[in-house]
Image (spheres, rainbow, N blue to C red):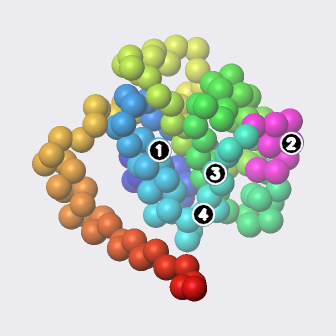
Amino acid sequence: MQAAIADVLGRQSSASFELFHAPGASSTTLARRIAWDLHREHPVLLLRHYSPDTVERVDSVYRRTERSLVLVAESADMGQSEREDLYRKLHERNTPVVVLWVTRSNDSAPDDTGRHTNNVMYRLAEPMTREEAREFRTSFGPAPALPRRRRRWKR
């Protein structure tokens, strides 16, 4: 998936990648990791709230940087109709953006009938198996040590 996203970004094009997942499947972590891996080459935006000003703000980042953008959003913060509206309005402005939309679902990924053609859907499986978790820890390293709590002043 990251290679497909990088390809779209490299062509100064736009696409929407939908990540459907069961609770606990780590889609948010995956989306943020992909964004982190791409952030040195492309501006990354984490959308926490969709408003009428969102399109203008996203477009202004593109105009300032002249780099294709990565926008990560969760369905809890931006509904499907808002995501499609954002994508359409940015496309009308010729703003190259990859929207990485994460949505929790207990069903399989829905049919994409009637959606724009640059829409790619992924369905992440249930939470990782023990073997997958071991590979994940190996790939991304050990957890950082937590700082010790400091004792308050002694009297």
Q: Residues within 10 Å of mark 1 (few under 14, many from 20)?
A: many
* Circle 2 Cα neighbour tier, 10 Å, few/some/many (<14 / 14–19 / ≥20): few
Q: How far apart, in angstroms, are the residues tagged by discs 3 and 1?
A: 11 Å
Quadrant of res 33 = bottom left
What residue appears at the point 35 percent right and 73 percent down from the top-left corner? 145
Query: Which mark is first along the chain, 2 or 1?
Result: 1
Reading the image, the residue beneath label 2 is 53
Query: What segment is highlighted magenta in the picture?
Result: 50-58
Residue 135 is situated, as x and y percent measured from the top left of the image, at 19, 56
The residue closer to the viewer here, 81 or 27, is 27
Left or right of 14? Residue 136 is left
Q: Quadrant of residue 148?
A: bottom left
**Front: mark 4 or 2:** 2
User: Which is nearer the eye, 104 or 87?
Assistant: 104
Q: CA distance from mark 3 to mark 2?
A: 15 Å
Q: Amino acid at mark 3?
A: Leu
As helix, strand or loop, the secondary structure at mark 2 comes to loop
Residue at (47%, 44%) from the top-left corner? 28
Q: Are marks 4 and 2 in contact (CB under 8 Å)?
A: no
- Residue in the image at 18% along x and 41% along y: 129
Against 85, residue 50 (above or below) is below
Q: Secondary structure under badge 4?
A: loop
Q: Amino acid at mark 4?
A: His
* Picture disc at residue 42: 4
**Disc 3 target residue:** 46
